[in-house]
Image (spheres, rainbow, N blue to C red):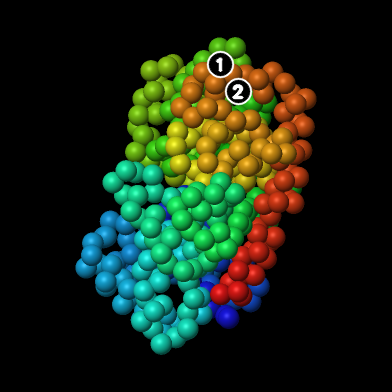
């Protein structure tokens, strides 16, 4: 096995895309030939800038979904398998997994397909998609024990499900560069080095940026040296800017927009937050902040509770601003506890979520086919 294709509908700025790029870079280091395939997306330029080849198959794109395009995508992927001599396809969502499975069946080239499950379908009118996991006989990588339990509850054979946690690249998220990166970001956004900086990184949709601003407004008077930095773009970006103005905290709430240098932002934070309202199997952004020794406050959703089993962070009820506010105050008032949790975060990032150990497990699954 030499050439491995990583397949997703679109490569946009989110956790799964980060994971796929990290995986491809590590595969290249270990002598494999990685190829990323998608319908396009805002992150393709970043992928190619890292020296990873990318092929665009437009019919894979989320915006192009139709029965006709699914058929075109199957035959288009078949041609890519044969032309590029692909040895294995690693799919990263259900729709492309379905396409890859059928493409692998109509090509003369042996090309097994495996799937990493980053989330299942909860919307009432779309839950039929979860049948894909049950009826197609491929290995499924679950990114948390919670994910595995959900897949089994959907009828997937337990023997087909392998748990491999998401990983973080400690060469990129390098704690030895924390001071340097922090200064760059704080200088850029005119945040004093002595300020306590709370941060969040992610697409502005269901991640709870708005609730974080509300919680921040509740504590801003009591903690005048605390500031908030939000990294990301999305459908509620303008709403969040307006909210910060309405709550009269705009001078201490900073909006970075879409950025690819997220390692620098994580290095600048003193406390990470992810008060998501729904979703979240095992958020990579938490692991990235843990790599810089940042403790965190995050919603008690899906696989997130698995990230605090060694005392790394605190959990809050989803969509509960009061609980979020209380947990922020608790950590701000308990420096000794916070520092203990920071040590736990760094230890777990190195020993459990290190991308090198994650990749060893992934390659073993590749070799099993």
**Residue 35 x %, y %:** 49, 72
Distance from the alpha carbon under mark 1 to that under mark 2: 8 Å
**Residue 37 x %, y %:** 42, 68
Q: Is residue 3 above or below residue 306?
A: below
Q: Is residue 270 visible?
A: yes
Q: Is residue 216 above or below residue 189?
A: above
Secondary structure at numbered mark 2 = helix
The residue wearing badge 1 is 219
Q: Which mark is residue 240?
A: none
Secondary structure at numbered mark 1 = helix
The C terminus - image quarter: bottom right
Q: Residue at x 35, y 29 (%)?
A: 239
Residue 300 falls in image quadrant: top right
Q: Observer-nearest residue: 94 or 346?
A: 94
Residue 366 falls in image quadrant: bottom right
Is label 1 or label 2 in front?
2
Q: Residues at badges 1 and 2 in contact (C-beta under 8 Å)?
A: yes
- Dot 1: few (<14), some (14–19), or many (≥20) neighbours within 10 Å? some
The N terminus - image quarter: bottom right
Q: Earlier in the sequence, mark 1 or mark 2?
A: 1
Q: Residue at x 57, y 63 (%)?
A: 159
- Dot 2: few (<14), some (14–19), or many (≥20) neighbours within 10 Å? many
Q: Observer-nearest residue: 132 or 211?
A: 132
**Residue 17 x %, y %:** 48, 56
Residue 345 falls in image quadrant: top right
The residue wearing badge 2 is 328
Q: Residue at x 43, y 50 (%)?
A: 120
Q: Is residue 205 above or below residue 144?
A: above
């Amino acid at each position: 096995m030499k050439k491995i294709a990583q397949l997703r509908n679109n490569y946009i700025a989110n956790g799964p895309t980060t994971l796929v790029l990290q995986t491809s870079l590590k595969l290249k280091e270990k002598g494999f030939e990685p190829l990323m395939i998608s319908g396009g997306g805002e992150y393709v330029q970043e992928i190619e800038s890292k020296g990873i080849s990318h092929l665009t198959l437009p019919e894979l794109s989320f915006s192009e979904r139709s029965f006709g395009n699914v058929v075109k995508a199957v035959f288009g992927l078949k041609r890519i398998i044969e032309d590029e001599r692909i040895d294995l396809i690693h799919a990263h969502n259900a729709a492309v997994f379905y396409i890859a499975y059928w493409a692998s069946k109509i090509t003369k080239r042996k090309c097994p397909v495996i799937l990493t499950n980053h989330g299942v379908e909860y919307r009432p009118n779309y839950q039929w998609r979860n049948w894909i996991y049950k009826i197609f006989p491929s290995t499924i990588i679950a990114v948390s024990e919670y994910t595995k339990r959900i897949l089994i509850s959907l009828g997937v054979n337990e023997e087909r499900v392998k748990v491999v946690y998401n990983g973080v690249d400690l060469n990129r998220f390098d704690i030895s560069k924390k001071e340097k990166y922090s200064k760059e970001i704080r200088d850029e956004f005119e945040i004093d080095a002595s300020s306590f900086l709370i941060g969040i990184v992610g697409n502005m949709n269901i991640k709870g940026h708005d609730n974080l601003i509300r919680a921040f407004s509740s504590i801003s008077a009591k903690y005048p040296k605390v500031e908030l930095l939000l990294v990301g773009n999305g459908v509620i970006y303008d709403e969040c800017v307006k909210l910060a103005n309405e709550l009269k905290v705009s001078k201490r709430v900073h909006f970075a927009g879409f950025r690819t240098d997220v390692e620098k932002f994580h290095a600048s934070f003193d406390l990470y937050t992810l008060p998501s309202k729904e979703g979240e199997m095992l958020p990579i952004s938490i692991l990235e902040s843990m790599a810089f020794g940042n403790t965190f406050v995050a919603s008690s959703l899906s696989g997130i509770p698995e990230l605090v089993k060694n005392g790394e962070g605190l959990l809050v009820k989803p969509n509960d601003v009061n609980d979020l506010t209380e947990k922020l105050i608790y950590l701000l008032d308990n420096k000794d506890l916070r520092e203990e949790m920071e040590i736990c975060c760094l230890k777990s990032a190195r020993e459990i979520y290190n991308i090198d150990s994650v990749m060893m497990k992934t390659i073993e699954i590749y070799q099993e086919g």
